[in-house]
Image (spheres, rainbow, N blue to C red):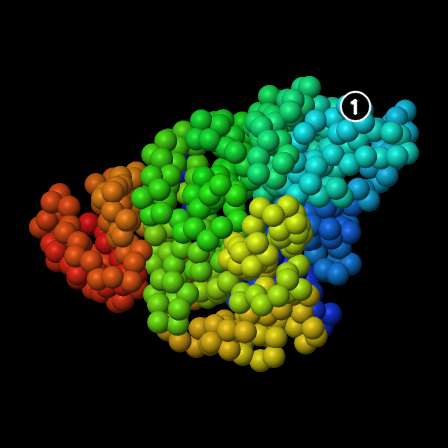
Amino acid sequence: MEKAWWKESVVYQIYPRSFCDSNGDGIGDLNGITEKLEYLKELGIDVIWLSPVYQSPNDDNGYDISDYRKIMPEFGTMADYDRMLQKAHELGIKIMMDLVVNHTSDEHPWFVESRKSKENAYRDYYIWRDGKEGKEPNNWGGCFGGSAWKYDEGTDQYYLHLFSEKQPDLNWDNPRVRKEVFDMMIWWCEKGIDGLRMDVISLISKTPGLPDGTVGKSGYGDFGPYCANGPKVHEYLQEMNREVLSRYDLITVGECSGVTVEEAKKYASLSGKELNMVFQFEHMDLDGGESFKWNHKKIPLTGLKQIMSKWQRELAGKAWNSLYWCNHDQPRMLSRMGNDSPKYREISAKMLGTCLHMLQGTPYIYQGEELGMTNYPFTSLEEFRDIESINAYHELTEKGVVTPEEMFDYISYKGRDNARTPMQWDDSPQAGFTAGTPWIPVNPNYREINAKEQMERADSVFYYYKKLIRLRKEYKIIVYGDYELLLPDSEELYVYLRGYQGEKLLTICNFTEKEITYRLPEELFGLAGEVLVSNYGRELLDKKILLKPYEAIAVLY
C-alpha cells in the first residue's frame, strides 16, 4: 500500500468555543489554543482539526459563516490566527481548517444581495423557488426541525436551508459559486494551512426538480435521497481537487452523511482525484431507533463490529478510513459506549481508545476524549445551548410525539452539548477554562477529571492515549496491516487480527463489566507475543485468559 503522511497521522479536534479562554469573556479563543499547543505536543498528535473560527452570527456555533476571510471577533483577530498557525508549525503540528460550503449565513454579503431581487447578480448563488399552491416548494424538513424552506416576502419566493433558516444552501450548480469557493480555499492554502475538513460536503449537489421526500415522524419529507451523494457531487469534488487540492500537500476529509461504502470508494479513492477520506455515520446511527436519534438505546456490539469491519475490509486497498468515536456533533463516547461510573471510567476509556486506535485508518481524538471526559448532568432546559436539541425538544413535545420528561432525558443523553462543555484543564474554578462565566456550564466532575491531575499521574487516560499515538508511529502494522474480525457474534468482546509483512497484531476488547474467558486463535499458539498496550498492565498472554471488566490488550506476534 502506498504510504502517506496523513495515513500515519493522528488528528485532534478542537472546538474553539470550549477549549481555552485567554481573556476571561467565557468563550474559548485562538490565543487560548496557542497557549495549549505545548499540551498537544506532549500528547503527540500530528494535526489539529479546528472547528470554524470564521466571522459568523453564531446561529449554529460558527457553522453559519458570514465572511470566510475574517475571524469571529469572539475568537480574536487574523493576527492571533497567524500567530497560532506559526507556533503550531514550529512544534511540528499541522492545522486543518473546517470548510463549510454547503451553505453560508444569511448575513453573508452574497445572500444579502441575493434576496434583494430576482434579477440580482447573486440571486442564483442560492436555491430559490416559487411556492406550490400557497405552500413550500416541496415537503422537505430541515435538520434542525421545521420546514427546509423559508419564505421571503420581498421577492415572494422561498429559499432552501437544509439546516437553520439562517443557513441558506449555496447553489453549487452555478459555476460562479464554485469559483468563489475555490478562490477562498486557495487564499487559506496560501496562508499555509495543512488540510480541510469539509462540513456536510456530500449534500452540495441536489437532484434536479427537488422531489418530495418520504414523510417521517416529524411530519416533513426526508431530503436525504435527493441531496446526499447527489448527481454531480463527485464531478464538483474532482473539479475542486484539480483547481485547489492537488496544488497543495493537504489532509482532506469529507463529512458525508448518508455515505455508503461504495460511495466512499469514490470520495476517498486512493487514486487521489477527490478527498483523502470521509467521515461515515453508520456506526453512530446504530442507536438511532424509530425517532431518529432521540432515545435511550445502546449501540449493540455485534452491530458495531459488523459495520466497523465492513468499512475496514471493503476500503482496504481502494480508499482510506477515518476512525472516530466522538466529535462536536456526538455525545461523549465514554457515556455512550463505555462506563462513566467512577469505578470503570478510566479503564473503559482506555479500552475504547485501544479498540479504535489499533484499526486501519486515521484516528480522530475529540478534545477531552484523552482525559475520559463524560456527558454533562443536565438538570434543566436552560442549560442547553444547541439549536438542534432545543428545537427538537419543543417540536416533538408540542406535537405529542414524546412527553417533556422523556424528551429531556433523550437530549441529556444524546445532545450535542455534551461534547461542547468546556475542556477540563485543572481543579480551579471553571476547570481552568476561563476566569469569567463560561458560555456553557462546566461539567461538575472537573475536580476529578482534568488535564493537570492526569499529567501528574503515570497511569492516567492521558498517558495511555499518548502511548496509543506513539505506537502508531513505531509499528507500521497498526497503520497499514490488513484486518480480520474474530468472534463476530459475541456481544461482549471485540477481537480482531491485523497482519503485515509476516507480523500479526491481536487486539482484544471486553465491552462489559463482566469477567470473560477468552481462548487465543490456534494460529497464534506457540508464538512469542509482545504486549504493546494493556489497560490493566498485563504483560503475558496464555492460550486461555480471564479478561477483566473492560479489559483491552494489543499483542504483536
Which residue is painted at 75% across and 29% down in the image? 136
In the figure, is residue 81 to the left or right of 266? Answer: right
In the image, residue 275 above or below residue 96: above
Which residue is painted at 75% across and 42% down in the image? 165
Give the percent coordinates (x, y) of residue 377: 53, 67
Q: Mark 1 belongs to which amino acid?
A: Glu
Which residue is painted at 66% across and 31% down in the image? 140
Residue 390 visible to an observer of this rendering? yes
Badge 1, how many Cα within 10 Å: few under 14, some, many 20+?
Answer: few
Give the percent coordinates (x, y) of residue 87: 62, 60
Give the percent coordinates (x, y) of residue 426: 54, 76
Residue 273 placement: quadrant? top right
Give the percent coordinates (x, y) of residue 439: 68, 66
Please give the residue where the numbered disc 1 appears in the rendered image: 133
Numbered disc 1: secondary structure: loop
Residue 343 placement: quadrant? bottom left
